[in-house]
Image (spheres, rainbow, N blue to C red):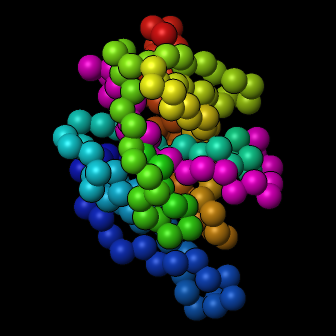
Amino acid sequence: MPASATARAVRPAHPADSKVTMPTSDELKDALSAIFDSQIPNYGDYNLVFGSSRQDNIHGAPGGDTGHCYVIGYRWRPQELVVAPFDGTSLTAGGVPVAINMTNLSHAVQLGGGEYEVGTSTGRTFRFGVQAEGKLPGEGRTIDQSEDQPDFHSFMAELIFRA
């Protein structure tokens, strides 16, 4: 999802009201781009993906774990990863973004099930998965990342190699 996308209003998911339509994948991408863009200088330099520690995203099966949601910005040159936490229900910023690059990377590993863990030399650690079909909290809130996921996995393989 390009970081320079213009944000559009996202309609909330209300399963009880069948007249309210669910947000499309593109609308969700625009909302996440807006979260990232509002917090990151030079936001246009990054490719963006949705990452989550939610078990239904990592393992593909529904789970009760609400987990953490992240807008993950990455760029190949200079190689850098920016992890921006957000509230998956309200689609608002949920914490201070952390930039991870070769100057502060303590570790980067791929765990079972395609999940990643990255950490900084200051002690911040993030664990997440990036799926082709990312599921945000709420019914019908799915982001299609099938075109972005392979490039992100290649990026992470290179980051892990360099770590």
Between 28 and 123, the one lying in front of the other is: 123
**Is 66 covered by the magenta stretch?**
yes
Q: Residue furthest left?
A: 42
Q: Residue furthest front?
A: 122
For image coordinates 63% across by 63% down, the residue present is 137
Can residue 154 be seen from the camera position used here?
no
Q: Is residue 65 left or right of residue 128?
A: right
Picture coordinates of residue 125, whole percent (x, y) = 55, 31
For the point 70% across and 41% down, the residue is 58
The segment highlighted magenta reads 59-83
- Image vertical order of residue 140 relative to residue 81, above or below: below
The image quarter in which residue 75 lies: top left
Q: Is residue 57 above or below residue 114?
A: below
Count of residue discs:
0
Q: Position of residue 128 (x, y in %)?
A: 60, 37
Q: Is residue 70 visible?
A: yes
As rendered, which of 36 and 139 lies closer to the eye? 36
Q: 65 or 20: nearer the eye?
A: 65
- 67 horizontally vs 73: left or right: right
Residue 2 shown left or right of residue 130 in the figure = left
Vertical placement of 90 versus 48: above or below? below
In the rendered image, residue 132 lying in the magenta stretch gets the answer no
Measuring from the top left, give residue 147's x and y in whole percent: 47, 39
| Residue 26 on image: x %, y % | 42, 60
Q: Is residue 153 above or below residue 85?
A: above
Q: What residue appears at the point 55 percent right and 51 percent down from the top-left corner? A: 69
